[in-house]
Image: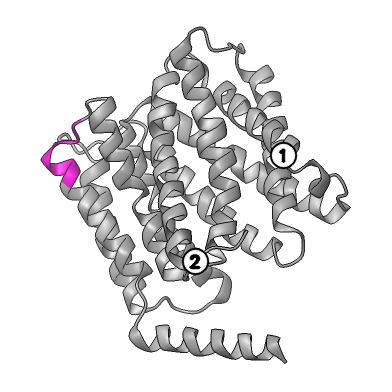
Amino acid sequence: MVMTQRQANWILATVSMAWGASYIFMKLCVDEIPPITIVALRFGIAFIVMLAIFFKKIIHVNTKTLIYSAIVGTLLCGIFIALMYGVKSTTASTAGFLTSTTVILVPVLQTFITHKLPSQKIVWGILIVTTGLALLIIGDDFNLASGSLYCLLAALLYAIHIIVTNRFVREVDALQLGIYQLGFATTYAIILTLLLETPVLPGDAIHWFAILGLALICSAYGFVMQPIAQQYTTPESAGFLFSLEPIFSAILAFIFLHENMGLQGYFGALLILTGVLIANSISKKQRQMRITKEIGKVAEDRH
């Protein structure tokens, strides 16, 4: 599949919208179906669909790919179990903005890994996001809002997932890694469901709609189209478009769930989005260096 940058950006925008919609889908079924069961159903259906579509491309897999898939699958399972418990006791809008702090946590974790101090824009982004978080998760009585810590845990696990995946895809096939991680996440979730919950299948149309939305739109479509589209656009464009995820979640939650975060909540959300965008921004000099590097790479490939 070959596409223009504009087409790639539109696809990434739909991926961001799909991920924003995931909080609505989770909210619709979390009160009727146990959280870990939802994770098992979500990734189980997504894995089966991806297996059917890409069977010939993933049937021959090596041991390293399976080991790496098992590792990222563990993180993926943890991310969405934490997120399910977070959504269960907070609003879909708040969960979306709290989870978006992953964009800040990735460079923070990289700082510990590389032992290099973060750039000034990252520091400013962290300070602004922290202020926004305080407004979102601390209530009038100065107690942490229920569910917020689960969402922040999900954001932390997602940041680790991004860093680990970025390293693994240099050594194994990205498509195989992406699909098999869904399989391992399903396996872990099924085991935990049998140990900790009483499994319950969706009982009516709206719950099946939510589960299928999570599986097909948010997981299968999102996980496959993201790496494909990112090949044809710039990192800063992708970062900006993914930063729109919580905006989509807040808009959809307002329309379909009639959620209202209140003045303090919306101001905190605005600060989080601002901090995320600042952390994602690159200078004119950095942009020129990237363009020069890409031109050099193309010239090298032609020779």
Q: Earlier in the sequence, mark 2 or mark 1?
A: 2
| Residue segment shown in magenta | 260-266
* Few, some or many residues within 10 Å of mark 2 (<14, 14–19, 20+): few
Q: Which colour assignment does the render follow? A: one colour
Residue that numbered label 2 is attached to: 4
On screen, residue 139 above or below 268: above
On residue 53, the disc is 1
Looking at the rendering, which quadrant does residue 39 occupy?
top right
Residue 263: say if magenta.
Answer: yes
* Few, some or many residues within 10 Å of mark 1 (<14, 14–19, 20+): few
Residue 249: say if magenta.
Answer: no
Looking at the rendering, which quadrant does residue 122 occupy?
bottom left
Give how far across and how far down residue 8 sits, in percent: 48, 60
**Residue kind at label 1, given as amino acid type:** Ile
SS for callout 2: loop
Q: Which SS type dominates the magenta stretch?
A: helix
On screen, residue 7 above or below 291: above
